[in-house]
Structure formats: structure tokens, C-alpha cells
Image: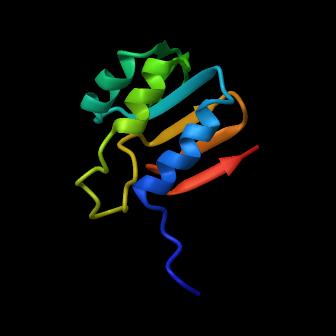
Amino acid sequence: MGDVRLTVERWRAIMAKELNQASRFEIHCWAEETGEIAAALAYGTRKETSWLYGTVITGEVTAAFSAFLLSLPKPADTEVCDKVTPFFSVFLDNGFSSEHYGTELNRC
């Protein structure tokens, strides 16, 4: 079978379509991802959860948030995982999710 890795361009195209059909988001970051948490907090607020090892940021899907998310460069730290996005998980209220740094896309 051929190479089926998701490129950042393909991720952006899929995410753009999904963002247009969503009104709320949740971003999940590991606790040590302080830069990513700070970036997400510019568009949302911390959600109280029982997750001991990370932070959940929730907010409204706005034009500014969509532009931010779709303009992020592909992360350079890809030794462990070929990251497409710097966020561990992005969940949208339309049932779509981008998980494991954009390497897995799901719809519930």
C-alpha cells in the first residue's frame, strides 16, 4: 500500500471544512506544552477536568480562531511522531477530532 501519511496541507483543507461546521472547540495539551497552552488560551479558557497530566482549553470557533489554527506551521519536533499540528488533540462540537498531533482524524 502507498504512503498514506497526512500532509499539513491536507490537514488544513480537512480542518477548514470541519471548522465551518462547528461552533465550539476543545484543545488538549500535555502539561509541559506551555507554549501551546498559552497560544490556545488566546482563543479560549481553561476547562476544569480530572486530567492530571494536561490542560484542556475550550472556546468558540471564530474566524480569528480558524485563521490561527489553519496558519500554524508544521512542528519541527517530529522525532517521536510526524506531527502535523502542535496540539495533541483538537475536538470540535460537530463530532470531528484531530488527535495525536493531527496524525489521526476522526468523526463520531
Is 81 located above or below residue 46 in the figure? below
Query: At 48% from the left edge and 33% from the top edge, which residue is drawn?
Result: 28
Question: Looking at the image, which residue sits at the far top?
Answer: 45
Query: At 62% from the left edge and 39% from the top edge, which residue is drawn?
Result: 17
**Looking at this view, is 4 or 58 the one in front?**
4
Q: Is there any visible trace of residue 56 in the rendered image?
A: no
Q: Quick one: quadrant of the C terminus? A: top right
Residue 10 lies, in percent from the top left, at 50, 56
Q: Is there any visible trace of residue 60 in the rendered image?
A: yes
Q: Indicate left or right for 86 with 63 as reference.
A: left
Is 57 located above or below residue 86 in the figure? above
Residue 26 lies, in percent from the top left, at 55, 27
Q: Indicate left or right for 76 with 4 as reference.
A: left
Quarter residue 60 falls in: top right
**Looking at this view, is 69 or 93 the one in front?**
69
**Looking at this view, is 42 or 66 the one in front?**
66
Residue 99 lies, in percent from the top left, at 53, 47
Is 49 located above or below residue 15 in the figure? above
Residue 82 lies, in percent from the top left, at 37, 62
Quarter residue 98 falls in: top right
